[in-house]
Image: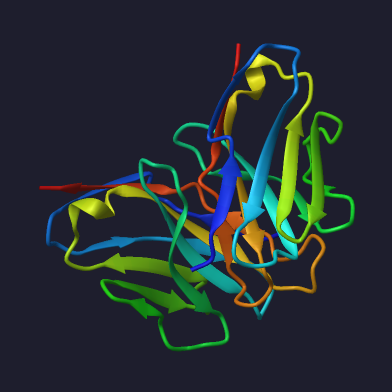
Amino acid sequence: GAVVSQHPSWVICKSGTSVKIECRSLDFQATTMFWYRQFPKQSLMLMATSNEGSKATYEQGVEKDKFLINHASLTLSTLTVTSAHPEDSSFYICSAYSGISYEQYFGPGTRLTVT
Amino acid sequence: AQTVTQSQPEMSVQEAETVTLSCTYDTSENNYYLFWYKQPPSRQMILVIRQEAYKQQNATENRFSVNFQKADKSFSLKISDSQLGDTAMYFCAFMKPGGGGATNKLIFGTGTLLAVQP
């Protein structure tokens, strides 16, 4: 099956710094990638949708200047949390969509802790 | 706007027994996809089963099957012969297929935490 990787799997950063999370589709080209945020014991909340070569579409309430998304190629999307604060601590999940089977393939997630 | 409702926050089942997880959704669309995803303690999202709305036949994947009632907008998941490895959070999700951009988004329910007891 299709494989999506995320790096890093766990990151701790100090308040005020920025952190970048990578999402890669390893064996297929992703026309669209999605970024989700998940708090403990809660559902996935869609943050933004990114298409290769174009600006990301952010969901209502998500600060686009804080959560920078770049979809540089058909296999790579990055999420940068800028000027991180403790309230940004969460589990971030990406998914990749090839458009072929109407299925999204999920990465393993990244746990971000801001101290 | 589409919504997905899972009314059972937690469920428990004995090993080898059968359990049914409920899901209802609201949409005015006629063409869409429904999914059940499993999220075990590792937090990796795993696709369990998928249903195309235009197909009347209920989808089946080994021990997992769905009861898709389009008129009632319900999409329940039945797990037969429950195994300890089925312990996970289960999310029902809706997707309206489209030509790209902001479409093809998954809309998730709040999830049902299933515990399989030995």
Q: Position of residue B94 (x, y in %)?
A: 58, 64
- Residue drawn at the location 75% of the way across and 22% of the way down: A18
| B76 horizontally vs A86: left or right | left
Q: Is residue A33 above or below residue B35?
A: above
Query: Going 75% across and 16% down the picture, which residue do you hit?
Result: A17
Give the mark count: 0
Residue A8, given in percent of the width and then of the height, sits at 58, 35
Q: Position of residue A58 (x, y in %)?
A: 80, 45
Q: Give the residue drawn at x 39%, y 60%.
A: B22
Q: Nearer the viewer, residue A26 or A113?
A: A26
Residue at (80% x, 51% y) in the render? A71
Q: Quadrant of the C terminus of chain A?
A: top right
Identify the residue at the far right of this view. Answer: A54
Residue B3 horizontal side relative to residue A64, left or right: left
Q: Nearer the viewer, residue B60 or A113?
A: A113
Residue B112 percent coordinates (x, y): 38, 49
User: Farthest front residue?
Assistant: A27
Which image quarter: residue B15? bottom left
Q: Is residue A7 left or right of residue B16?
A: right
